[in-house]
Amino acid sequence: MEKEFLFALFKRFEKLDLLDKIPQVLEKIEQLEEVCYNNNSQDFLSSFIFIDDALKALKISKRHYYTLLKKGTFPKGIRIGTKTYLTRQMITEMMGKHTIKPSKS
């Protein structure tokens, strides 16, 4: 089964003319495996926040969220199935970009 998957993946990369990207993809897969299998899976999973929870914490309505998303001022998020998640890093970066810093007087 694994050989069939790897062969299909190789064919897909070949078709898309991305064979030179295979080492980078394998490196990313190894990083994900390391995070997931080295008892860090809870740390990894806790970095994801369901979009509804994030909006509630930020006190942003769904309607305003879609407006901000359309303008490009709010991160798009990661879709897994029918749900959208944000990472804590996405929220922190977005808040850093849109925080008003006090002027030095």
Image (cartoon, rainbow, N blue to C red):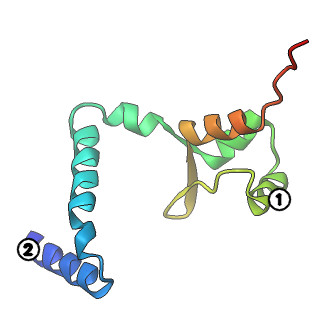
Quadrant, the C terminus: top right
Determine which residue is flagged by label 2.
3
Q: Is residue 95 above or below residue 81?
A: above
Residue extending furthest bottom? 15
Question: For mark 2, does the 10 Å Cα neighbourhood hold few (<14), some (14 to 19), or many (20 or more) residues?
Answer: few
Along the line of sight, the residue nearer the viewer: 5 or 99: 99
Asked if residue 94 lies left or right of residue 88, the reply is right
In this rendering, would 53 be left or right of 28?
right
Asked whether the residues under the numbered discs 2 and 1 touch, taking CB atoms below 8 Å apart as contact, a structural biologist would say no
Picture residue at 63% right of the left edge, 57% below the top: 76
Element carrying mark 2: helix
Q: What residue type is labelled 2?
A: Lys
Give the CA separation, mark 2 to mark 1. Answer: 45 Å
The structure residue drawn at horizontal position 68% and vertical position 41%, both measured from the top left corner, is: 94
Q: Name the residue under label 1.
A: 67
Binning the other alpha carbons within 10 Å of mark 1 as few (below 14), some (14 to 19) or many (20 upward) gives: few
Q: Where is residue 1 in the image (x, y as percent from the top left)?
A: 10, 73
Image coords of residue 55 (percent x, y): 73, 43
Farthest-out residue, front: 105
Q: What residue type is labelled 1?
A: Thr
Q: At numbered mark 1, what does the secondary structure look like: helix, strand or loop? A: helix
Q: Which mark is residue 56?
A: none
Q: Residue furthest right?
A: 105
* Number of disc labels: 2
Relative side of 65 to 79, left or right: right
